[in-house]
Image (cartoon, rainbow, N blue to C red):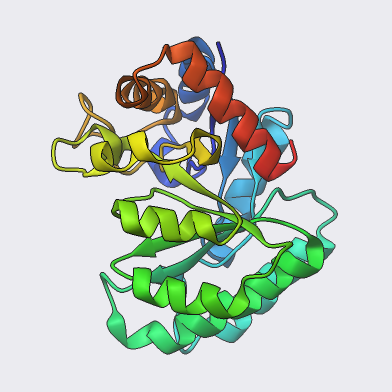
Amino acid sequence: MAFIDTHTHLYQPAFDSDREDAMVRCTEAGVNTLMLPNIDSASIPRLHAMMDQWPNRCFGMMGLHPCHVKRDTIEQELTTIEETLRESGRRYVAVGEIGFDLHWDKTTLAIQHEAFEKQVAWAKALKLPIVIHVREAFDALFEALDSLNEENLQGVVHCFTGNLVQAKRVLAYGDFYLGIGGVSTYKNGGLDEVLPYIDRDRVILETDSPYLAPVPFRGKRNESAYTAVIAQRVADLWECPLEAVAQTTTVNAKRLFAL
């Protein structure tokens, strides 16, 4: 039984003391493939280092996270990330993570829209899916996708925490998926009112480690090995065997990211 963690920041400093051990724990848990979303220009070397050390297990994305969209650096950040995406000679599986975050700073919404539009254009040109971060900003996301979506655009709303109406609206854009993580295990996470009622062929698993660890590890550092814990929660909500969740979500991830 094998799982894919479609969104993990295992390259971040939180794992500097035990990254190789964390990879061993992934193997023991059946998590054989990890997808690494970029966040800004500074994270690129760290992400590349993991891709180089585990070339058959770690697959990178390239994008500018909305929390790193700043007025005084946006132009240079986007230039560096686009050059890396197009000219590094590496294969990236997605443009991400990109999107909208109004939790920390609502004043950057206009330039978040600008960054999102430019990065979606890269994805269209390169025929790559987009990996979307959205926090307290579904209205902004829907406004953008209503304008930018087209038949050949694919993507996933990672760490989906919305309601059923929002889930169905995301999936209605076409070839879009929901990334399900540790929030699904939280008592008031709300995903028990979503997961049983959506197409299983549009669900992929993720941890977003080191953030949002699932129960019973909530409040501690998250890691990719816990993908199996999240999968068990999905199995419980779908009322199906764990093996079925592993198979379905693996097929879904491979289809979305062309693995």
Q: Position of residue 4 (x, y in %)?
A: 56, 29
In the drawing, does residue 16 fall left or right of residue 117? Answer: left
The image shows residue 259, relative to residue 228, as above or below, that is below
Say whether residue 172 is visible. yes
Query: Which sits in the foreground, 237 or 231?
Result: 237
Please tell me which residue is depicted at 28% across the width and 53% down the height of the picture. Answer: 163
- Quadrant location, the C terminus: top right
> Where is residue 85, by image quadrant?
bottom right
The residue lying at 22 percent from left, 44 percent from top is: 190
Q: Residue 64 in the image: x percent, y percent?
A: 55, 67
Q: Quadrant of residue 229?
A: top left
Q: Specify the quadrant that holds the N terminus.
A: top right
Total labels drawn: 0
* Picture residue at 41% right of the left edge, 20% below the top: 228
- Residue 233 location, quadrant: top left
Is 240 displayed left or right of 161 in the figure?
A: right
In the visual, does 35 lie left or right of 193?
right
As displayed, is residue 131 above or below residue 143?
Answer: above
Residue 136 % position (x, y): 28, 67
Above or below, comparing residue 150 to residue 254 in the picture: below
Residue at the location (23% across, 27% down)?
217
Asked if residue 3 can be seen in this view, the reply is: no
Residue 34 is situated, as x and y percent measured from the top left of the image, at: 58, 33
